[in-house]
Image (tube, rainbow, N blue to C red):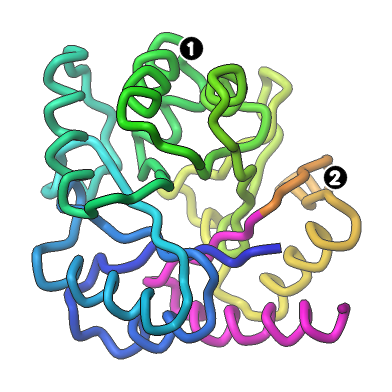
Amino acid sequence: MWINCDIGERGADHPVDRELMSVIHIANVACGGHAGDADSMAVFQNLAQKNGVKVSAHLSYPDREGFGRRSMNLSRKDLYSALDLQVSRVPGVERIKFHGALYTDSARDPNLAETLVAWLDYHQIKTLLCPPHSCLANLAEQCGIEVLPEAFLDRRYQWSKTHELSLVPRTYPDACISDISVAMEQAKQLLCNRQVIALDGEAYPLEAKTLCIHSDSPIALELAREVTRYLEAER
């Protein structure tokens, strides 16, 4: 099981982000769409190389003002232009994770998913981090792209009326987990039982190959260390 982290969103010198690079396995480096700049991209790619961490380009709608959390109705041409610019800042990258609204929209919208998979295939991307059994995951697998199904340790899940598991929107008060014991319990459920306890108290299946921690979570570093210790103890 790999720990991945959305990182480089708070500049090049953030001490927690830098320390996380010694604990995680995959760094999803912000490439300027929602956050990140030339300095942060260079620093975290360099830290990844030094620490043996795999790099994923973290791409979003071109929406720095909204931190990539607002859906945008872009033409295919405009979306491709935005993604082309972002991925060019991580030369040779073979892994992609979409961010925020683009991540959520492409999981549910087959047309957007098809658009993104065509872009991934054109750029010869080999690995995609995304929600399991989503529109994006299914189409990427059909195209021969390796999918790393992802689950989050610092976000809560809900069972929707359309009978699917999804993240609780950040606009809700219980969307994020800031208690280390609660986050570790979610990690153990995912690792041991391949399930997650949703807001309704029920357990739902969720099989993941990588667990995500957001670097800006107040428990990010402690959580990454705790999960690492747990994984090592279970080997």
At 61% from the left and 25% from the top, the residue drawn is 141
Earlier sequence position, callout 2 versus callout 1 = 1
Quarter of the image with the C terminus in it: bottom right
Residue nearest the observer in this picture, 125 or 167 = 125
Using a 10 Å C-alpha cutoff, classify the residue at mark 2 as few (fewer than 14 neighbours), some (14 to 19) or many (20 or more).
few
User: What's the mark number on residue 221?
Assistant: none
At 26% from the left and 35% from the top, the residue drawn is 70
Q: Amino acid at mark 1?
A: Pro
Using a 10 Å C-alpha cutoff, classify the residue at mark 1 as few (fewer than 14 neighbours), some (14 to 19) or many (20 or more).
some
- x then y, percent, for residue 221: 50, 84
- x then y, percent, for residue 23: 53, 83
Q: Nearer the viewer, mark 2 or mark 1?
A: 1
Q: Amino acid at mark 2?
A: Glu
Place residue 190 in its image quadrant.
bottom right
User: What's the mark number on residue 202?
Assistant: 2
Give the extent of the magenta segment. 210-235
Residue nearest the observer in this picture, 78 or 213 = 78
At 72% from the left and 74% from the top, the residue drawn is 184
137 lies above or below 176 = above
Quarter of the image with the N terminus in it: bottom right
Residue nearest the observer in this picture, 129 or 142 = 142
As drawn, is 138 to the left or to the right of 1? left
Is residue 86 part of the magenta span, yes or no?
no
As drawn, is 224 to the left or to the right of 208? left
44 lies above or below 100 = below
- SS for callout 1: helix
Residue at label 1? Answer: 110
